[in-house]
């Protein structure tokens, strides 16, 4: 199973970024997909998740600013990040939970992509 993130970078406060995550090796349409982030010295936290049926859940700090979506045809999940703040600076990780081609259940991660928001 592989997740490959892209779209991170440096942006000024108030700006926007869109992260993408391409999945392979999983039964994608049946997996819960999510984005997590980890800032230096802090624990990894949930940013947003989306079920196979499209039900979304967001961390309190990003509600109304970030939006998660998925494409079950192309096995991809996206995170649209608007009104970015310096405190959004972190490494963002794509995550999948559910059946894969080799296991009934797996919890798998991408390598992460850095998002830096300057003030």
Image (cartoon, rainbow, N blue to C red):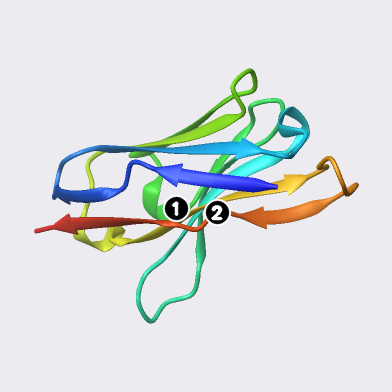
Element type at mark 1: helix
Front label number (2 vs 1)? 2
Q: Kindly identify the residue that appears in the image at 73 percent across and 56 percent down.
A: 107
Q: Name the residue carrying label 1.
A: 60
Give residue 95's position: percent from left, percent from top.
Answer: 60, 51
Camera-side residue: 41 or 65? 41
As measured in the structure, the alpha-carbon distance from the residue carrying label 2 to the one carrying label 1 is 23 Å
Label 2 neighbour load within 10 Å: few <14, some 14-19, many 20+: some
Against 89, is 33 above or below?
above
Q: Quadrant of the C terminus?
A: bottom left
Camera-side residue: 107 or 69? 107
Q: Kindly identify the residue that appears in the image at 55 percent across and 53 percent down.
A: 110
Against 71, is 57 above or below?
below
Give residue 58's position: percent from left, percent from top.
Answer: 51, 45
Give residue 90's position: percent from left, percent from top.
Answer: 34, 63
Relative placement, left or right, of 61 versus 93 is: left
Give residue 87's position: percent from left, percent from top.
Answer: 26, 62
Q: Mark 2 touching mark 1, by CB under 8 A?
A: no
Element type at mark 2: loop
Q: Quadrant of residue 16?
A: top left
| Mark toward the start of the polypeptide (2 vs 1) | 1
Relative placement, left or right, of 26 versus 67 is: right
Instruction: Indicate which disc residue 80 carries.
Output: none
Camera-side residue: 114 or 33? 114
Q: Name the residue carrying label 2.
A: 110
Q: Kindly identify the residue that appears in the image at 49 percent across and 74 percent down.
A: 43
Label 1 neighbour load within 10 Å: few <14, some 14-19, many 20+: few
Q: Quadrant of residue 66?
A: top left
Q: Kindly identify the residue that appears in the image at 24 percent across and 50 percent down.
A: 9
């Amino acid at each position: 199973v592989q997740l490959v993130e892209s779209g991170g970078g440096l942006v000024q406060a108030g700006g926007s970024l869109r992260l993408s995550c391409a999945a392979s090796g999983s039964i994608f349409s049946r997996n819960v997909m999510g984005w997590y982030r980890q800032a230096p010295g802090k624990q990894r936290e949930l940013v947003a998740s989306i079920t196979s049926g499209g039900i979304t859940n967001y961390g309190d700090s990003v509600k109304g600013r970030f939006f998660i979506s998925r494409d079950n045809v192309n096995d991809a999940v996206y995170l649209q990040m608007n009104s970015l703040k310096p405190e959004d600076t972190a490494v963002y990780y794509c995550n999948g939970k559910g059946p894969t081609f080799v296991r009934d259940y797996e919890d798998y991660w991408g390598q992460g992509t850095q998002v830096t928001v300057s003030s």
